[in-house]
């Protein structure tokens, strides 16, 4: 049962697609304090709080304070409060053992501005939702189980995005492959290593001077033919699209946007100028229907060249600086000239310079023309990236309604899940980020983002072979499986490491698992179900299962428990019932063992990966192929646990 409560005068987000009349009676379950602009829920000792999409920390969000404020922050450390996305859906639940008969409760806070979730941070037993303005639609969902609440919620937000089948294959990315020849080399090396590959990503350097929908002809001569050449090899090229449009006379997209008045403007009516990768840029007003349609149609330029997938970046939007703020900073610096910096002025000075990127005040300098209203950006900040993805998704529906196009985005808000997936942005080659990747998946699935994953091997910092291998042992089970790393970091394409055969075995296993992965994915989308979930979603009455935060069920047949500790040759795994473990060294070489419910130390060397099959379930395994399209369903064999 879903109830909607309306507070103040909410700005519509189009995240919910089913019309629900607001309640006339005041909210119960949560205690509303209009003066404090707050909703409060008193947590029981055993309550677990799931959800909040792509955020830092664990699967249970209790014990930290989160700010929904889409942020370009490449340092995903535990002390942060915001990442790139805002998915304000949570479920409060507890184990039913002991027959407390307490039912779980879901809450969706539909507010495109900043919202703070203090989940047992200030007081471990209090869950507060604090609004900047108390203008929001709040949905409270009661249900029989966590999965039931997920299903009810997903029903009102509409069906999740489905990518083309090849997008479930392995993708290789790097910031950046600078030339077509460099990409040819990557494809050649993967082929030589016998490692399956379906896509290679183009990061910003394929563009000419970082201008959206252009190609650097010197680096990528005859691009259209190159796309075809790659496609003949079975490789899809996936270019990045950035949110900012370069200010440059003669650049048609800039000129059209200016002429049609499609860029975000300041209070005084002038177009906002912000610096991002292309240098001085303007932001298309994705919230405006006409501007959104206009920008979306530009994807056709690349679709016409044979491109079938994209990733949208920098759409929080990230801002290196605005020209206005920069001028203020220069003035401020001038005022220090000739003066001595004492301690206080030294820190002030340093702070002034350090404050130029992603400055909160800059998000108050521009406006949107949204549904006939002029709205200051910070009030709708969290739906900007969503509407960029929507621009693309709506355009694909117009341009090629019968074809699935790959689309995923960095920034998001619930609603964007209908138009694309997400990747978790600039993580680091840290062991703790393997676990973070695992822990981000359930929250994303709950809020409709089923096609998701993180940069395998870590984006920032230098990766090591063992870390990349362990990370891959998780990622082969996740829908978006892409190895990506940043400029200046150690290269981490699989063929560059020593145990190439070990990596091949893992990617082969991924391709062998495709029938299961694809079915599980499609089921999650069609039935508003979970793709990756913690044990407690299934074993509601098993108190021990509620305490497991580093294992996942992938669909309801198999469980994974990846190793994410440096130099560890195994780990403890909790089995919520008797299960059959398959320990793979390759798709041909594995052992099977039935293990009893309970805790086990599972030995898994660096080249081994364990899958646990639930009783009465089976795991189909296809003969691996070098490309998704070449997987032959007739080769499927089944490993079952039908005891
Ligand atoms: O400011 O395009 O998250 O995946 O490689 C960095 C360069 C901009 C951030 C993305 C990352 C991408 C990078 N981009």
Image (tube, rainbow, N blue to C red):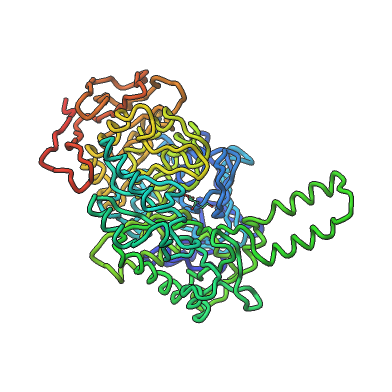
Q: In this view, does 255 lie above or below 241?
A: below
Q: In this view, does 197 lie above or below 596?
A: below
How many discs appear?
0
520 relative to 469 in the view: left or right:
left
Percent across and percent down for residue 465 are 42, 29
Residue beneath the point at 79% across and 50% down: 348
Q: In this view, does 45 lie above or below 84?
A: above
433 relative to 38 in the view: left or right:
left
266 relative to 399 in the view: left or right:
right
Percent across and percent down for residue 14 are 43, 66
> The N terminus is located in which quarter?
bottom left
Q: Pick out the residue farthest to the left.
A: 634
Q: Pick out the residue farthest to the right.
A: 339
Q: Which of 155 and 390 is in front in this view?
A: 390
Percent across and percent down for residue 202 are 40, 53
Residue beneath the point at 55% across and 70% down: 247
Residue beneath the point at 53% across and 78% down: 258
């Amino acid at each position: 049962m879903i109830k909607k409560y309306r507070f103040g005068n909410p700005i519509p987000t189009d995240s919910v697609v089913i019309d629900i009349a607001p309640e006339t009676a005041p909210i119960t379950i949560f205690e509303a304090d209009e003066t404090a602009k707050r909703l409060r829920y008193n947590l029981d000792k055993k309550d677990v709080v799931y959800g909040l999409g792509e955020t830092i920390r664990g699967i249970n969000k209790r014990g930290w304070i989160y700010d929904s404020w889409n942020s370009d922050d490449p340092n995903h450390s535990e002390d942060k409060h915001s990442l790139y996305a805002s998915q304000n859906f949570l479920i409060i639940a507890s184990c039913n053992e002991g027959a407390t008969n307490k039912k779980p409760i879901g809450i969706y806070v539909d507010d495109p501005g900043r919202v703070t979730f203090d989940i047992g941070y200030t007081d471990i037993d209090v869950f507060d939702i604090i609004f900047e303005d108390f203008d929001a639609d709040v949905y409270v969902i009661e249900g029989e189980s966590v999965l039931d609440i997920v299903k009810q919620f997903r029903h009102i937000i509409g069906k999740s995005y489905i990518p083309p089948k090849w997008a479930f294959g392995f993708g290789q990315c790097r910031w950046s492959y600078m030339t077509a020849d460099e990409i040819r080399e990557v494809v050649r090396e993967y082929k030589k290593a016998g490692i399956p590959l379906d896509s290679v990503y183009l990061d910003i350097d394929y563009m000419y001077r970082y201008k959206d929908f252009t190609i650097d002809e010197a680096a990528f001569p005859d691009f259209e033919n190159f796309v075809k050449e790659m496609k003949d090899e079975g490789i899809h090229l996936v270019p990045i699209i950035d949110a900012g449009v370069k200010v440059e006379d003669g650049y048609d997209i800039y000129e059209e946007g200016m002429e049609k008045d499609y860029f975000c403007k300041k209070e005084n009516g002038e177009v906002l100028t912000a610096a991002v990768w292309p240098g001085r840029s303007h932001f298309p007003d994705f919230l405006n229907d006409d501007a959104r349609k206009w920008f979306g149609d530009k994807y056709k330029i690349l679709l016409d060249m044979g491109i079938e997938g994209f990733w949208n970046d920098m759409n929080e939007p990230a801002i290196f600086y605005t020209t206005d703020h920069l001028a203020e900073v220069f003035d401020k610096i001038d005022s220090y000239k000739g003066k001595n910096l004492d301690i206080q002025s030294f820190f002030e000075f340093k702070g002034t310079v350090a404050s130029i990127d992603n400055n909160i005040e800059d998000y108050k300098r521009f406006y949107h023309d949204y549904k006939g209203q002029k709205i200051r950006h910070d009030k709708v900040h969290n739906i900007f990236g969503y509407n960029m993805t929507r621009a693309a998704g709506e355009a694909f529906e117009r341009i090629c309604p019968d074809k699935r196009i790959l689309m995923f985005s960095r920034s998001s808000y619930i609603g964007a899940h209908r138009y694309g997936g997400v990747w978790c942005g600039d993580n680091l080659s840290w062991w703790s980020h393997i676990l973070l990747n695992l822990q981000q998946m359930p929250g994303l699935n709950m809020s409709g983002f089923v096609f998701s994953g993180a940069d395998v091997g870590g984006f920032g910092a230098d990766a090591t072979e063992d870390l990349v291998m362990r990370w891959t042992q998780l990622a082969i089970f996740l829908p978006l499986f892409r190895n990506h790393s940043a400029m200046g970091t150690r290269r981490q394409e699989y063929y560059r490491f020593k145990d190439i055969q070990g990596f091949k075995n893992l990617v082969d296993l991924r391709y062998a698992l495709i029938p299961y992965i694809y079915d599980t994915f499609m089921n999650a989308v069609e039935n508003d179900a979970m793709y990756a979930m913690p044990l407690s979603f299934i074993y509601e009455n098993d108190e021990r299962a509620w305490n497991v935060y580093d294992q996942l069920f992938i669909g309801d047949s198999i469980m994974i428990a990846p190793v994410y500790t440096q130099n560890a040759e195994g780990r403890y795994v909790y089995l919520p019932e008797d299960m059959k473990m398959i320990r793979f060294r390759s798709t041909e070489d594995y052992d099977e063992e039935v293990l009893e419910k309970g805790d086990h130390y599972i030995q898994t060397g660096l080249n081994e990966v364990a899958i646990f099959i639930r009783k009465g379930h089976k795991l189909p395994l296809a003969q691996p192929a070098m490309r998704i399209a070449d997987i032959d369903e007739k080769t499927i064999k089944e490993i079952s646990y039908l005891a």
